[in-house]
Amino acid sequence: MKIKHDWVLKTILVRQLEIVDTPFNWFPGDLSASDMNSLDEIGILLPLLVQAVNDSKYRLVDGFKRCSWLKSYTSNSGEDFQQTELSCLVIPASVSMQDVAKIRLETLHSDPKDLSGIHLCRVTNFFMKEGFLKEVIASQVFPRLGLISSVRLAGQLLELHDKLAAPRQQKKFKLPESMTRMGYEDLLPLLKFTNKDYSSVVSLAEKMEVKGKKWRNLLQVLEEVIRMRQSTAAEILSCSEFKKIMTDSNLQGPVRYRLLKQQLDILRYPELSDMRNRFDQNRKGLKLPQRMMLECDQYFENEELFLTLKIRSTDELREHLRNLSETLNSENRINAWNDLFAVLREE
């Protein structure tokens, strides 16, 4: 950040700062442990960046996390905090909001993996409101945030901002904590859902508490099921199978996700699900020993079976081979084997 000649270094009381009512607290949060330890030892050395509003008021532009640390570090008395003096670098009031926004961008040192998707939406919307074109946001703002320069992404984040903000503004419901921590890639799939489905998806996020690829895969299959069955998220997730999974308090997160995804796959791929069920039934009919496993390609893309024998001795191997021989000489078992291969050969 290049300091201009008309900026001045000045000591300002905390009570003179606009900390809450400022549009520049883009990524609220706490300092890292190392930064807090450093502040505990030597205090705040780097001046805060502010803009003059009038003779006695200043808008905080950069230094929000340091102010938050100072408030917690100061005694419990709010008056002590308000009377604290801070060294500040003051940008003149004559500088436009657009130019101050560009200056704020230069102060950022952010990893996109650490940025909340909701906050990215708000920042994108802020620049749009201040008169920046999508092309400018893509080329000048996104690189400073560690994002790819994409006009399409700018449009998606603006659309996502409106979608996320509408329920809060209408006081319909509050976003769960799990969603406020999601990155933008986990939130973009919400754009595929209608407003009618939106609250059900938010409720799903609150109960599942998953993110990343698992969350995106779950939403993708759910959206496909909605389109294929010409239904709604609420109707699908209210089915008894789903309600049982979602309300069972004994299920751990990974198990709940697997069961829910499994049920969605059954609806999304009914023929594949039917083939898997018939294969499992016929495999059980073989009555293979516990340490002998028969598998096939999970999508039935080839006609091969995979037989795995677990052995600890030649005697166990001999026993496995004897059992196989018996299944191949039993009429009922032969029929089961043939039925297995028949499933593999279905179009």
Image (cartoon, helix red, strand yellow):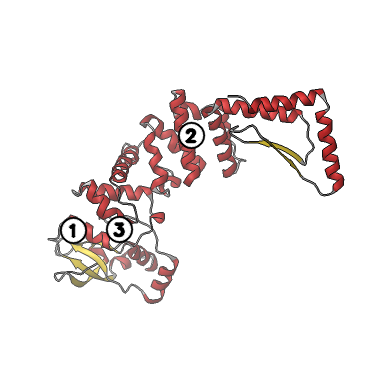
- Identity of the amino acid at label 3? Arg
Label 1 – label 2 distance at C-alpha: 44 Å
Mark with earlier residue (3, 2): 3
Query: Residue 226, percent across and down?
Result: 45, 28
User: Vertical placement of 35 versus 102: above or below?
Assistant: below
81 horizontally vs 210: left or right:
left
Q: Quadrant of residue 67?
A: bottom left
Who's the residue at 72% across and 25% down the image? 338
Residue that extends furthest to the right in the rendered view of this protein = 315
- Identity of the amino acid at label 2? Val
- Identity of the amino acid at label 1? Asp
User: Vertical placement of 239 versus 80: above or below?
Assistant: above
The quadrant in which the N terminus is found is bottom left
Mark with earlier residue (3, 1): 1
- The residue under label 1 is 99
- The residue under label 2 is 221
Between 134 and 181, the one nearer to me in the picture: 134
Who's the residue at 36% across and 37% down the image? 191
Mark with earlier residue (1, 2): 1
- The residue under label 3 is 144
Q: Pointer 1: residues within 10 angstroms few (<14), some, or many (20+)?
A: few
Q: Are marks 1 and 2 in contact (CB under 8 Å)?
A: no
Q: Pointer 2: residues within 10 angstroms few (<14), some, or many (20+)?
A: some
